[in-house]
Image (cartoon, rainbow, N blue to C red):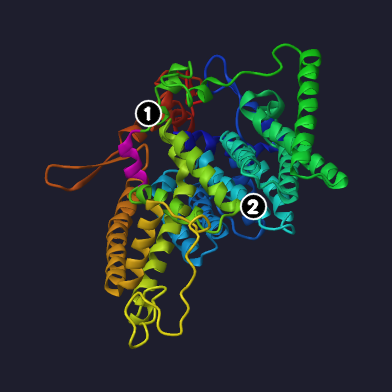
Amino acid sequence: FDPWFNFRATEYMVSHGWRAFQAWFDEGVWYPLGRHVGSTTYPGLQLTAWGIHSALHAAGYPVSLNDVCVFIPAGFGALAAGITGLLAWEVTRKPNAAVAATAIMAILPAHLMRSIAGGYDNESIAITAMVTTFYLWVRALRDDGAWPAAVLCGLSYIYMVAAWGGYVFVLNMIGLHATALVLVGWFSPRLWRAYTLWFLIGTAGAIFGPARYLVGWQPFQSLEQLGPTAVFFGLQLLQLTELMARRRRLDATGKLLLRLKVFGYAGVAVAAAGALLLPEGFIGPLSARVRGLFIKHTKTGNPLVDSVAEHQATPAAVYWHYFHFTIVATPLGLITTVFKDKSDAKLFLVVYTMVGGYFSGKMIRLVLLISPAATVCAGAFIDFCIAFLLDALSATEADAEPKGKKEPPPRGTKPGKPGKGVKKPPAARTDKQPTADGGSLFWQELEEVYHENVVLRRSLGLLMATVLGLALFRFVPHSFALAQSLSEPQIMVRGRTRDGSFVVIDDFREAYWWLKNSTPQDARIMAWWDYGYQINGVANRTTIADGN
């Protein structure tokens, strides 16, 4: 139902301009209270449509605003698929993984639910902004000369803030990844530089950018946004201690003691300043919706919000419905990726998959958040299967020679005894020899058996390729069938008669047109809140309640 309000708001912005939109008080909704749209709407979607519409007209293509709004979700969905491929490349450095991730993201039902043409909603551009921000973040950590990507990451984050309230997830994801890098001992000036640039640019754009009326000073007041702010100041202290330790030429122990001292002083100073300077209530609690993601059975307190189906916990069947085989390939791809050639980008994939997987289980609509991570993992698993199959098919009998095969003893000697003129080797010192536990020996023996048996290698490769091929054979038609159902209009319902022929049930549209043609223009319509958007958008009548 949201696209109807979004289109109506876009029409107002295009007709009256940005300043009038910010000051717009809509008296046609929530009668008799009304609604101040400028301070209750993330305007990124409307600004995007307005910009594309103006650019096309300036270029000599007189496209209607309706057509622009209809095709924005599909166009940005294509962009999201391509950028997800770039993210897969940055994480795995494998072209096959990047191509596979791009193809899967393009048809994945979890992504299609917000990238179908006509689904003119905030998430349709927000997913593209989110994936772009994540890609630029890991790109900024590739090497010391990649810091310009952090600047672009900050700009992409500003667009994400303007597009959707889900920017809080992006904010905390980057903060968690930086924290994880520090905890595993991978802190570096590169991380400090990238996070500092991203945080300063992104936070300034969030506070003073297009969504400033919604965001305000929440990065420094909202409990769900204070974590990344604390990470920012923590990284500054870490970089300071690194410089001090280098000047003093401290060893590891001395550096640790210096860090403890600096962080201790900083903690005391922050606690004292907070207690003495900050007014009571300056730091707000977690919102009811965020608390509901952590505490079982917690509701938002708004019965209208709690009644929405996509705000309920995610059943297990939903994952197969929207992800199909990728829900199985995700953990397999994660395992085959992260335990080889560790990097900052791979650690990001681990954090993203775990955090996104947790939140996707708390609310049905949040399965959208995990779709890029699942796609990257599935692409990595497909690349692993391709490499495994090619390695198995290229194996020859020469490759099957056992490692460390001993030469036969000289003629005339008994096995196990040295020949004449050969000195007996000294007895081995058992206290100096490396030992291996039973588990290590078992896996080592399995690896040797695998390498020595060419038939086994080829059989396993063909088996893996067959299973993957069957999964893809079922996944593609499943995605296209679901895409067809997701593309159905919301005010017209397709059905079948007893003889199997299709029939279009047009009752909703006819009812809205009846309201438009048969009621006074100042009529107030009372209906369940879902239909408020459509009554406003199609019938052009004032409603008692709508979806916001």
Front position among marks 2 and 1: 2
492 drawn magenta:
no
Q: Residue furthest top?
A: 280
Q: Which residues are magenta?
A: 315-323
The residue tagged 2 is: 136
In the image: residue 1, left or right of residue 468: right
Using the image as rendered, state which of residue 530 and residue 276 is in the foreground: 276
Residue 302 versus residue 414 in the image, above or below: above
Residues at badges 2 and 1 in contact (C-beta under 8 Å)? no
Identified by mark 2, the residue type is Leu
The CA span between labels 2 and 1 is 34 Å
x and y percentages locating residue 495 in the rendered image: 23, 41
Residue 309: give its label. Answer: 1
| Amino acid type shown at disc 1 | Ala
Q: Residue furthest left?
A: 499
Residue at the spot x=44%, y=52% of the render?
A: 335
Q: Residue furthest bottom?
A: 411
Q: In terms of sequence position, does the residue under pointer 2 or pointer 1 come before the other? A: 2
Observer-nearest of 302 and 202: 202
Q: Main secondary structure of the magenta part?
A: helix
Density class for disc 1 (Cα within 10 Å; few <14, some 14-19, many ≥20) is few
Which of the pair 285/160 is nearer the observer?
285
Residue depicted at 30% across the width and 33% down the height: 507
| Residue at point 42%, 28% (across, down) | 311
Is 356 positioned to the left or the right of 308 in the image?
A: right
